[in-house]
Amino acid sequence: MKAVAACFALLVGAVGAPAASILGGALIPTPRMVTAGQGPGFHVGTETAEAWYLTAPDQAAAGRLAGQLRKSLRDAGLTENARVVTSAGIGFRLVIGDARDVPAEATELPNEGRDEGYQVDVSASGVSVTARAEVGLFYGIMTLEQLVRHACLTRDTIPPGRIVDWPALRLRGYHEDYGRDQLPTVEDHKRTIRTLAKYKMNAFIWYTEPDHFVYRFDPELGKGVDRFTFDEVRELVAYAKRCHVEVIPLVELLGHCERMLADPRYAHLAEAPGGSDLCPTSDEAFELVSKIVAEVSAAFDSAYFHCGLDETYSIGQGKSADAVKERGLAWVIADYYSRLDALVRSHGKTAVMYADIALAHPDILAALPRDIVMMDWDYAPRERYPGLAVLRDAGFQTMSLSSSWAWNNLYPPCPVAFANMRTFAKQSAEAVSLGHFVSTWGDTYGLACGQNLSEMNSCILAYCGAVTWNPDAPPDYEPFSVAFAESFFGSGSRELAKALDLLGGCQGPDWSHDQQPRTLLHSDLVADAFAFGAEGPAGARFWRSMRRDAASAHRVLSVARVPLNADYLRVIDLCARMVIYSGDLAEACRGIGATVVSGKALSETERIRWAGVFEELLRRYDALWEDYSAGYVATNRPLNLARIELNWDAMRGRFQRFIADIRAGVFPPTVEPRMLLSLDFDGEGPLVPLASSAGALRVIDGGNGYLHLPSGSCLALPDPDRKLATGYAPLHVELRIRHAGQRPQQYGSTVLCYGTPGRGWRLALDSSGHVIFTIFGVLDLVGPGSVVPADGAWHTVAVTFTECQRVRYYVDGKQTDALVMSGVPMPDANPRLLVGDDPSRVTPFEGDVDDIVIAIP
């Protein structure tokens, strides 16, 4: 952090030089313009006794700014003698020392920086911060806090010079997932709001599903999950307003309504039975949506109302099928969007909608009102994000959304997340978008949602602030870690910065190992032994490198003492410990798995040794749970913790069974090849009940019988005795397929699926005909060389999954791909075989199938 003073000294007299070259990433965000001054800087140590003079056009504004200034000075280390004197006057100005030689107003702000911009002038005699609006001086104080903190930690001097600063994007902020049960306490919400303000972000999108508010029209809706009361909403909205943060409600109003639609009172409003989408042509469903919008919009004072509307893949497959057939899918969706836009406008708000469905069906865009703001989301690090240009050229204002990549990871994989944010924010500024946001998600993992503690996202928020304020000067990874350690934790320790750097990068520079360390906390140990025992040297190097870097970070984090956000640092250290544990578990599974792969039996000595290794890992697992649960309740409402604990308990049981099997000599398990199911629809094969979830399904019987699946139909074959559950045994799935093409769907079109919601396996096709094999909760794995042509002819497709990791694809009798996916397709109780869709009813297949074979090869 001494780079601040050093760079100023090196560039004395440099006028208008790029901020990054002068500050070296020492401020978050990097200012837009910096001019280096001459001579000594301004001394401001921990015993500074000078008064800080704050002027605003009215005393109320002066009082608000003075409150923030006092907090900033305390956070910066000026705990003694810092005195703030306020007065009413012309303009917004903060002065310390003899500032007669600095301008009385912000002289160099461009028009686009008029409202939120500020100017800082530093000389040996004083510091002046000026702005044209209250929010501008507020952000100037945020910068001053970092400068003072650095001065207190280093040479007690703020370097001489001028900063002229303003944002590139109008809206900059955080998109936090509350729809999956990690609902922070009111006080922790306020801390997040303060963090957004510290890094000059001005918007906070609350993602919710419809059952996460306590409604007057139906207080029972969503009972049993954590919910906001509207009094809490108003309290937090008012608090955010004082920090110049706009809280934008996001309520899913078409898709992702599964819990609301699971309520028997509302189930009939679904597009398809058991699905997650509302029926867009149902007036009764829209009446329910109208009630939700009325109550939510009244509680938020934002100019925007985000309606969600993403991933609605079942539309046209159920109750709206006739309307879609008559008028087209794009018309039905556009009509619903337009009705929703009019509803939101009637409450004085501007509607915001996710753009994924409209981008997949461009005819929707042509039919929509242009006052809708379209949010393009894309979480992959790319060189360009084409959706923004498509939306802009169609005449829409846009927002963009990147991701923290924290969901189902033990700590955000920062190289991936930063690349996504950096490029998307810059492209958004170039496209004159309204703003850019970074998202966090709490997607389902096993039995529960929202398992990743939100404290670990602090560095993500800071980086988003950096690239949305000044996308032309994104900080490099290592300098950013130094600046973040200083500004967020109040620490000038280079060791702490390096520890944060190591932890953020320990999962690799890309997403090739995405979610894998997190998965090991709730995995199947027998499957892990198969997978790691057969893993090659490159995989072993990754896990050992990950473990080494996390351990190096933990050694620093565990003993670090910081003046700010110390409890958050403890949670980050917990993340490091969980990464270390995953690395050690992977190493143990690799060791014992070598026996599995070789086919040898464990000797009695080896059984005793390995049982001891896994018993020690279980003790560490229990200790991690104690610290995790304590961290959870410290900042979150406790209701969902009971569901999360089910995951930990289930893993504890798997540990105990695995250890018992090792001691008893029944590990590794033995299996015998056998046929599990043969179904050919021509009067032969097993007699099974045919239960269709849509009336259009037909079984074409006779000597050449086959099953015809119109889009939206699904054949369900219950398996209460779990005869098709292969466990750790190899799995072979084969069938014949005939189709004329599949419509684009995020997760492909499911041809065959076995298991329970979120557990089991499936075989699917994407819109290009590529074969997909999925282990739910693990991965969708596309066979790049495995294509089933949409030529109306029959083709034989097969997938073989062996050693709990090797996936081989076959098309028309030829092996077309050999890939790797570690896991076990283990369903919960009461599984079903589904032909034509998955349990959530969002990935329908359209075509014909025949000659289904499921076997242990």
Image (cartoon, helix red, strand yellow):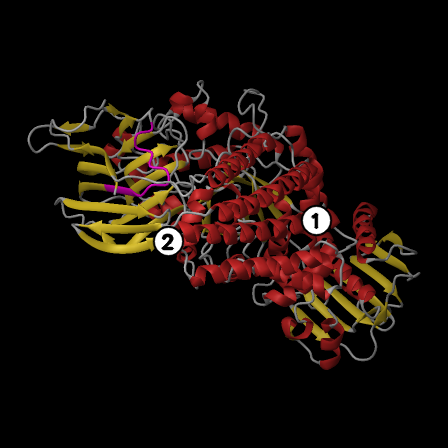
| Residue positioned 19% across, 38% down in the render | 847
* Image quadrant where residue 149 sits: bottom right
Residue 545: horizontal and vertical position, in percent?
Answer: 54, 62
Residue at (68% x, 74% y) in the render: 22
Residue type, label 2:
Ser
Q: Amino acid at mark 1?
A: Arg
Say which residue appears at 61% left-offset and 29% top-offset: 639
Q: What is the C-alpha distance between the residues marked 1 and 2?
A: 42 Å
Left or right: where 833 falls relative to 63: left
- Near mark 2 (Cα within 10 A), the count class, few <14, some 14-19 or many ≥20, is few
Which of 35/494 is in front? 494
Q: In the rendered structure, does residue 724 fall within the stretch colored magenta?
A: yes
- Please state the extent of the stretch shown in magenta in the rendering: 722-733
Q: Quadrant of the N terminus?
A: bottom right
Residue 580 lies within the magenta run: no
Give the main secondary structure of the magenta stretch.
Answer: loop
Residue bearing the label numbered 1: 570
Query: Disc 2 marks which residue?
Result: 598
Identify the disc placed on residue 604: none
Up the image or down, 425 lies above or below 839; here it is below
The answer, for residue 591, to whether it is visible in the render is yes
Q: Could you say where residue 625 lies in the image, as x and y percent from the top left?
A: 62, 39
Tags 1 and 2 touching, CB below 8 Å? no
